[in-house]
Amino acid sequence: MPQQTSPPARVATRDPLAWAVALVALGAFAGCIALWRTGGGTIDVSWARELDLRLHFSFDGIGALYGLLATGIGAAVFAYATAYVPLHLDHQARPARDRWRFWPWMALFMLSMVGLATAQDLILLFVLFDVTAVCSYFLIAFDRQERASRLAALMALLVTGGGAVAMLIGAVILYADHGTFSIPELASLLRTQDEAGGIATGTTVAIGLIAAAALIKSAQVPLHFWLPRAMAAPTPVSAYLHSAAMVAAGVLVIGRVFQLVEVAPVVQDGMLAIGLLSIAVGGALSLTRDGFKQVLAYSTISQYGYVVMLYGIGGRDGATAAAFYVVAHAIAKSALFLTAGTVTMAAGCRRLSTVGGLARELPVLAVASALAAATLSALPLTIGFFKDELFFRAAAEHSTLLGVVSVLAAGLTFAYTWRFWGGIFLGERRVGGAADDAAAAAKPLAPVPALLTAPIAVLAVLAVLGGIVVGPFAELASDAAGATLGHDVQLQLAYHLDARETWMAALAWLLGGLLLATPKAWGPAARALSRAGERFGPSHVYELSLSAVNRWSDRLHDVEVRDLRSRVAAVLLPGGILVALGFAATPTAGVFQIGSIDGTDLLVVALLALVAIAAGVVAFTHQHIAIVLALAVVGLGLATVYALLGAPDVALVAMLVETVVTLVFLAIVAYAPRGERPSRRELAGVASEPQRRHTHSRRWRDPLIGVVAGAAAFLVIWGALSRPTPAERVVDELVRLTPAAHGRDVVTVILADFRGLDTMVEVTVIGVAVFGVIALLRRGRTW
Amino acid sequence: MTLVFALAAATIFGFGAYLVLTNDLVRVVAGMVLISQSAVLVVIASGLTRGAAPILPTGDERPSDALVQAMALTAIVIGLAVTALLLAIVARVRATLHSLEVRELARDEAEHTAEIEQSQEPQLEELDRDEAEDEQ
């Protein structure tokens, strides 16, 4: 429940970190305007030449549109958040330093959106696409003490991250077929190919994968379910995520790769269908929701459905209308989200059923959000009017049927938008209770800081300004459409009372009004759809598959961790089978060589026999001290063998290592001799099970496995050693080069020079192991 | 000599394989050490020439194969790292769980996990209900 703004929160409102990020956004906004007016610019740097990767950014029309949105809406949302975040942290009794989990991610979110808007390379697009997903993960899970927030963040990451992988696969297929990741180059290559007789199926699949990634990001049906869940985020995050970042990134990518989509009509038709479906499902579900942010979340699904549908219609009309729609929607939707946040802060509730009639007490907020709602529902004198005019024109030009559908869609939008606004600001005054609750009627509102209203007012003014002076916005949209289509587009917008589109809009308002007036007529059907979606829908599939994966991992854990033997077997057995297959596939007839024994070899044979006997002692004794001593005999015996075989370096190192290992091993064994301490079970009073009498088969199983493993190893090693290839002698070359490396010991030179990188990694392995040992012995403390 | 090397390496490997399957963690570690010793022996034995040490100027016309020696050195050092880590784990397991019997440890862990899961279940169900309400 919100209380009076406490002193620490007030101090934190002047938080330099927050203002720094907000000012960066404002500065970036100014920079974007300057770049747009001066015609932009291009950065093209080769990044990884061997892989054909380029850092290719170009501030074209799309870059200008989405860059201005990300920084402009960003500046408004960030300014709002400077007041919101301290209050939010205060309500949850969290320390002020948690703001460090908010602002850096918001800043990165904005930067990655600007980067995404200007990227001209598919791999760059993929990387920045994923950066936005990572940012959204941390921002959605900002209230990380809440399980719902964590699950929502995971869902957003998994679903959109899965999409991003599809995009990467698509990009790689296109590269394999056409030899470039550059989007402009691909566009011209594909257009030429299309004119020459159509593109290959693989290319269509690749384009489909990229489009799918974009649609998932824009929360289109059937993979829309992550977006309503993501409402677990703090309100400024939701506002930004819905209007200018993350979800906008999806349609941004479609706009960017639109020239590729154009040559694959199947993909474009699919987008049209998915857009329509999203408009319908999002709109219908939005009418059934009670939580402020849930209503808005489903409306976003529906609104981006419009944009996707417009890209599906394609052509000049579609591309222009889509670009304009994104701008108008971003302004209106961010304002409505921020309204929801302010009302929640003031009234302490977040459901339409528990508030009402707040217009008198929050007049500025009511007017500002009414203007935003008017924009979304396309009333005249707002920028939204033109978004629907363009939408109606594109739809009606495509076909009459689509024209009719577009009117229905706009009616739906009108209904859910005003249901949201009316539910908060109209009706009987109540806070935190039902309509006839006396306590709710009298409960006062918490004071609202000016910064929780001002950004909404600014956005509302912008929306109205856009309805009167539409020129700059039309220019922005036509520039973006130009970049999307690859040729210049002109867009003139003005009010025409007699135009077909105006009549269609009027019809839509009428329809919307009817829907608002008759909730009883459609309510049961919409709620049934919602329930069916919950029970059988894609989110259910997601949960089922996630819990299935969880179960599998548990089962694997059970098998692997709870029984060391089966883990060892899981490595040994497939390894053995693979080796056996390799052995069976290699011809073996007549290649086994016994080899001659001469000179010092007799000594080596004797030593090896000693080593083998010592290994047997290790295997059959149960005394830990004896095991360690026999191991030392094995190691030192082998070291002597290496010395006799002309490998003094190896012998010296082996000697050193053996000495150290033996001492450490002895220390570990002596540290607590076997059986001295009672086990945990014995301490708990549960008697340790009596040493089970191994059954006959069990007693013989382990030695048998050992014998089989040894025999198999013998065959393989003998086969391999008998087959030298003296023709290629790398080592002669190494010996020859050794003086050039300023060394005399060939082995040392190989390790330190010829294979220096290898040795460096080896040293790293040792370092990691040392940290592991320290952490283990010091109970997790590294120092 | 080929046969002798193969026999010796295979014997060490066989004993090692037997040991990693045993119930006592110290013997499991010993088995790992034996297997890595056997691998180093195979690498050294696969050298194409055997002669004097490959240190310039070599008196021998064909000194010992330096390449396999470099590989063997790497293998020995990595083996040291693995052994050290394994021994540290053994020490830690014994210090906290007072047992080195694999079967006993596995049983304890299974019981412990079951306890944790049981204590969490009602709590999780409640959380799920809250979540379903928030969705509306």
Image (spheres, rainbow, N blue to C red):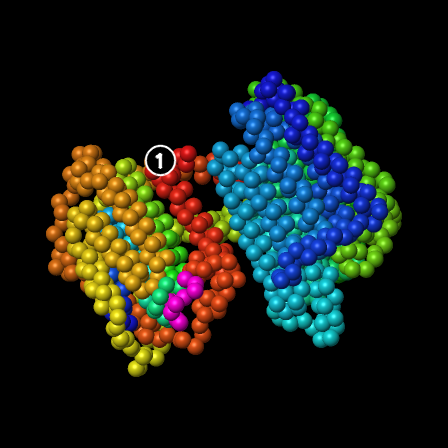
Q: Is residue A156 magenta?
A: no
Prevailing secondary structure of the magenta residues:
loop
In the image, farthest residue toward the bottom: A590
Q: Nearer the viewer, residue B46 or A319?
A: B46
Residue at x-position 49% and y-position 33%? A145
User: Subunit of mark 1?
Assistant: A
Residue at x-position 61% and y-position 22%? A9
Q: Nearer the viewer, residue A444 or A693?
A: A693
Look at the image and tell me whether residue B110 can be seen.
Answer: no
Q: Percent position (x, y) of residue A652?
A: 34, 54
Residue at x-position 73% and y-position 75%? A196
Look at the image and tell me whether residue A694 can be seen.
Answer: yes
Q: Percent position (x, y) of residue A711?
A: 24, 68
- Looking at the image, is B57 positioned above or below residue B122? below
Q: Residues within 10 Å of mark 1 (few under 14, many from 20)?
A: few
Residue B11 as seen in the image, left or right of residue B129: left
Q: Is residue B56 magenta?
A: yes
Q: Nearer the viewer, residue A108 or A499?
A: A108
- Looking at the image, is A743 positioned above or below residue A628? below
| Res A699 quadrant in image | bottom left
| Res A317 quadrant in image | bottom right
> Which amino acid does the dot numbered 1 rest on?
Arg
Q: Which residue is mark 1?
A: A779
Q: Nearer the viewer, residue B71 or A90?
A: B71
Q: Percent position (x, y) of residue A458?
A: 76, 32
- Looking at the image, is A769 positioned above or below residue A319? above
Q: Percent position (x, y) of residue A611?
A: 22, 59
Mark 1 lies on a secondary structure that is loop
- Highlighted magenta segment, given as a residue range: B55-65
Residue at x-position 27% and y-position 75%? A596
Residue A338 as seen in the image, left or right of residue A506: left
Residue A453 as seen in the image, left or right of residue A567: right
